[in-house]
Amino acid sequence: MIIFCYDPLVMSGGRLVLLVAFVISLVACVVARWWAKHNEDSQTEWLATLTGLASVVSVGVVIAQLWFEEGPEPRPSDDPATSQTAESRSRAPDEKRTSPTTTAEPITTPAPSASLPSEVRSTPTYRLEHKDVPLAIRSPGTCESAYTVVDFDGDPFGDGPPITRRVVDWDALTSSEREAIDMYYETCVTAVLSVSPGSSVGLLRKGEAAEEVTAEQCAAAASGASIGGELRIDNSADARDAGFEVGASLCARTPQGRVAKATITHISYESGFPAVEFTLTTWVRASS
């Protein structure tokens, strides 16, 4: 009987099982006390009573402990192994896309573009503006403090400032008018073709000044400033030796960025001084 009363202490399984065990233990203890009292055995009666109370208290303590400490049975998603598997499944597509072990497009570094030679990069591009426009410079007068001035930025068709004009009073010119002058021609004892300060004028000799001369070649000749500050073109100076003759070309770069090529077509003499005729070709920057 004593063993029967303590059997519930070793039972396990859940709240319902413990509750049933508690009821059975209580009933068994009551029956044992009744049997001891019915047989008038006081010692057995007290022993049964104490044993029953101990069983009831023990089972009650176990029930209370399990009732408050035992959590709800784990759900499938609460199982660590199951949760980890489910999480792996849910993350698998993203991890597959970002995993370093998956095959990905190789990262390639584009090869640097081939660099152009410095002379090509720095050479401006020009477009033809005017071609073979007739132009002439003549003696402004003998020792009259007069000049024939040349402005290659002028308009050859008369819609703007002229390319050539006679100036009798240099001091009457404004600063902008003076800065626009590329060359000026004066005659007194000698005939001198001078380059204005800040301008750049060069000479392409006969044979170099062919029809196929480009704007870049003419600009290079102008940058060379091969005629210096002035060039004597009268007979006594023998300008032919300097390259100033029919077929040669004057090349200039103007303040407005224009390139001009004035090719000598004829030289005549008026009162002993040269009158020079040209055909003028001009280029401007392609963006102009």
Image (cartoon, rainbow, N blue to C red):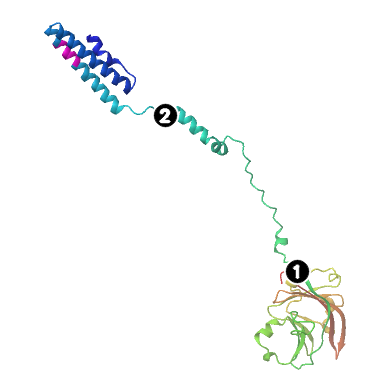
Q: Nearer the viewer, residue 166 or 35?
A: 35
Q: Which residues are magenta?
A: 46-52
Residue occupying image coordinates x 25% and y 10%: 4
83 vs 171: above or below: above
The residue at which mark 2 appears reads as 75
Q: Is residue 141 above or below residue 205?
A: below
Instruction: Please check the rendered image and state whether residue 275 is part of the magenta-colored stretch, yes or no.
Output: no
- Across and down, in percent, residue 137 comes to 81, 85
Q: Amino acid at mark 2?
A: Arg
Q: Quadrant of residue 149?
A: bottom right
Element class at badge 1: strand
Q: How far from the left and from the top, in percent, is residue 230?
A: 75, 80
User: Which quadrant of the rendered structure holds the C terminus?
Assistant: bottom right
The residue that appears at 68% across and 91% down in the rendered structure is 172
Rendering quarter of residue 46: top left
**Residue marked by disc 1:** 126
Q: Position of residue 98 (x, y in %)?
A: 55, 39
Give the SS element for disc 2: loop
Magenta stretch holds residue 47: yes
Q: Amino acid at mark 1?
A: Tyr
